[in-house]
Amino acid sequence: MFNYEDLIYKIKDLNPIESVIGEYVKLKKSGSSYKGLCPFHSEKTPSFFVNPQKGFFHCFGCGKGGDVITFIQYIENVDFNDAIEILARKSGINIKDFLKNKERGIASIIFETNLFAMEIFKKSLFKNRNALEYLYGRGLVDNDLASFSLGYADGEKTLLKSIKEEKLNIEDFIKAGLVQKTEDGRVREVFYNRIIFPIFSLTGNIIGFGGRALKDEIPKYVNTQQTAVYTKGDFLYGLNFSKKNIGEDNFCFLVEGYMDFISLYKSGIKNVVAQLGTACTENQAKILKKFCEKVVIMYDSDEPGQNATMRTIPILLKNGLIVEIYHNEKFKDPDELTKNLKKISFDILKKDINDIVDFSSFYFHRKNTDKLLAQKHLLSFLKSSVESIEDDSVRFLYQDLVRKKIGFLIDSKKSETQNKNQVQENGLKSSVYIEVISIMINDPSLCKTFCSEMDESDFLDLNLRGIFVSLCNSVDEDYNKNIDLIFKKDIIDNLKNILIARIDYYSHELPNERKVREILSIIKRKKIEKKIYEIENKIRNFTDDEEKDRLLEIKVLLQKKLKGGKFYD
């Protein structure tokens, strides 16, 4: 949402990392740093350190680390932009006032535009008897309408009229996805004759809307299309209401629609979210993993709902979540369930909760009258789903579950090999480049040494190359600006945590000249080895003998250079 460097530096300046973290963790002075029990994993001996001078924290137990913004992201389960907002509020910064003399960001424009539209929709609801009767008929009362900010798009161009009356910029409403231009140049409202469900971000900003038809119209739902702040598959409806309960319970119910969410939430099942689509996406699974470890899928009980469940199971499993399925065909959906049960609680629901083996077995045996064919599809589904699980412990649990339930052994060799290769690629292969970045950030003189001795092509680790280039371009900048490069770059999380640990190490003990030369030699050797590998591939693919001979000569020269250890011309 915010791209202003001065705003970020101002927020960091007014939020000393030891003070902010001290609100969540009991810190004790330890030399020039502070230490305490890590808030991200259970421990008895402090392994969580905060370095005020360098402006970062690091846990040597779980590996988490970062700056004050990263800490808020972790502890509050929010993204970068939301963390900025939280810290701004902590330090009394009014972001709007701060940016008033700057160009207003597109996100701010959309949030304000959506807020204006929501108020119009809310007023229209209480002017439309049919819309109110529809919602009252679904079991809602006025307090529910207010709690979830429900509204109505009346189809009488009320929004367009209000825009004109208030002399607002119509282009802002187009950017927000509320208004569209027609082919003949006129404008039309996107939502009309529909119940409106505002979709909120975790910090309470309105990022989009869902509109449901009052009758059986096609399409039944119209949603905000992709905007600068909203992509349907990247958000979960209701998470702003239920995030605290989900975190406390460490599991959630995942439903399909707006009314499913509202019905469960108002009935006392607070740990629930809706997915805003026909199946869960990878990004939504990643969001859920931030808040809990288990998800109970609670889709419609009909065939389309069961099909969607089967599509969602492997997505959630892959992201390391424990997955269960609520299955009760007496009720069409969670909304109907809440209306038919006098009382609803987890204890009542849990008798109809199935593990993935039982549900998928039911699913395939219903779809296939041939029992052998059903069993084949079941085994194939379970095998591919379990093998895709990236979390070792979760994958082991499901291998054991499948073996105990149906006697089918899912071989883990393939998964172990893939994980081993990934560790090597992200860890050992990257280690020397991590050392370079860590040293460069700690010492301007050594930073200049590496920049003069190496060029961009020497940096084979693409995850870290961008940081190397940025450091060389800002070699005379202050430390805090350089370390910010790590937190801004979109690099693999485990590399980011290793980097923070190595930066902390070199802040106490810089390498001598011999160590620097060793690192440079390793990097040059890696580059030559890569060239030899590329030449060998070309030789295998070339049919031109003359070109093959030329490549072989180059290969021999490079091999001699490797053998002689002469990496500098």
Image (spheres, rainbow, N blue to C red):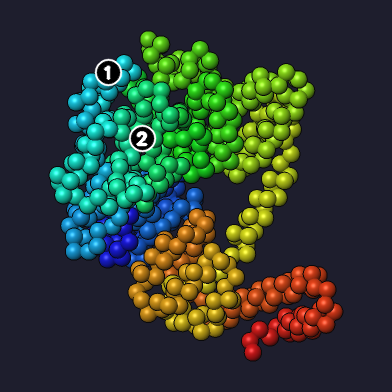
Distance between the alpha carbons at the discs numbered 2 and 1 = 19 Å
Q: Is residue 434 left or right of residue 55?
A: right
Q: Is residue 261 left or right of residue 107?
A: right
Image location (x, y in percent) of residue 101: 18, 64
Image location (x, y in percent) of residue 511: 51, 76
**Residue type (three-letter) at the residue carrying disc 1:** Glu
- Disc 2, SS: strand
| Residue 361 visible (yes or no) | no
Q: Is residue 242 left or right of residue 419?
A: left
Indicate which disc, 2 or 1, sits on the residue closer to the N terminus. 1
Image location (x, y in percent) of residue 417: 71, 50
Q: Is residue 347 above or below residue 325?
A: above
Q: Looking at this rendering, what residue extends furthest in the front direction? A: 184
Q: Using the image as rendered, state which of residue 333 and residue 455 is in the foreground.
A: 333
Which residue is depicted at the point 39% across and 16% down?
A: 338
Which residue is depicted at the point 67% across and 32% down?
A: 382
Residue that badge 2 annotates: 210
Q: Is residue 438 left or right of residue 142?
A: right
Quadrant of image for the N terminus: bottom left
Callout 1 crowding tier (Cα within 10 Å): few <14, some 14–19, many ≥20: few
| Residue 490 visible (yes or no) | yes
Q: Using the image as rendered, state which of residue 80 and residue 423 is in the foreground.
A: 80
Residue that badge 1 annotates: 133
- Disc 1, SS: helix
Give the number of callouts: 2
Q: Using the image as rendered, state which of residue 389 and residue 35 is in the foreground.
A: 389
**Residue type (three-letter) at the residue carrying disc 2:** Gly
Callout 2 crowding tier (Cα within 10 Å): few <14, some 14–19, many ≥20: many
